[in-house]
Amino acid sequence: MFSLWKKKSNEKSESLSPHAPQQQSSGALSWDKSAVQALAQAVSQAPVPSMMKQRVKQELSHAAEEAARKEGKNTVTAQHLMAGILSRLPANMRKKVEDAAKQGPAGLKKLQDELK
């Protein structure tokens, strides 16, 4: 009976192991102060229940770090955060956000009003 328990524990740890080498080999990235502030703002404005905010923060952090790594950078910036957020959006929404950003603050405000 004990060996059965031990086997389940081994199976459980093996199922987690594919992620561990990836995390270790990729290394931790440092975060620019502006990126930390932008992440906090994005999480606070996310239209999700408060109990989901931590999950949103993790997803956005991973997306930003992925964008930084694609550029070969060791520091995550606010631009990487934005690129990460855009990479997670559906194509039609990404296009709307990019078009609104090209118009500047007025375009972003207009998009925000449309989405309400």
Image (cartoon, rainbow, N blue to C red):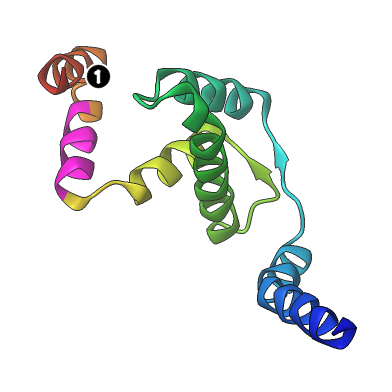
The amino acid type found where label 1 is placed reads Gly
Report the magenta residues as a range: 92-100
Vertical placement of 86 versus 27: above or below?
above
The quadrant of the image that shows the N terminus is bottom right
Q: How many marks?
A: 1
Q: In the current view of this chain or complex, which residue is farthest to the front?
A: 1
Left or right? Give the position of 10 relative to 40. Answer: right
Left or right? Give the position of 83 relative to 111. Answer: right
Q: In the current view of this chain or complex, which residue is farthest to the left?
A: 114
* Residue 48 horizontal/vertical position (percent): 38, 27
- The residue at the point 29 percent across, 46 percent down is 89
Left or right? Give the position of 100 relative to 10. Answer: left
- The residue at the point 87 percent across, 87 percent down is 3
* Residue 94 horizontal/vertical position (percent): 23, 43
- The residue at the point 19 percent across, 12 percent down is 106
- The residue at the point 39 percent across, 25 percent down is 46
Q: Would residue 97 be counted in the magenta stretch?
A: yes
Q: Would residue 95 be counted in the magenta stretch?
A: yes
Q: Main secondary structure of the magenta part?
A: helix
The quadrant of the image that shows the C terminus is top left
Q: Which residue is mark 1?
A: 104
Circle 1: element type: loop
Vertical placement of 18 versus 96: above or below?
below
* Residue 95 horizontal/vertical position (percent): 17, 43
Mark 1 crowdedness (10 Å alpha carbons): few <14, some 14-19, many ≥20 = few
The quadrant where residue 40 appears: top right
The quadrant where residue 11 appears: bottom right
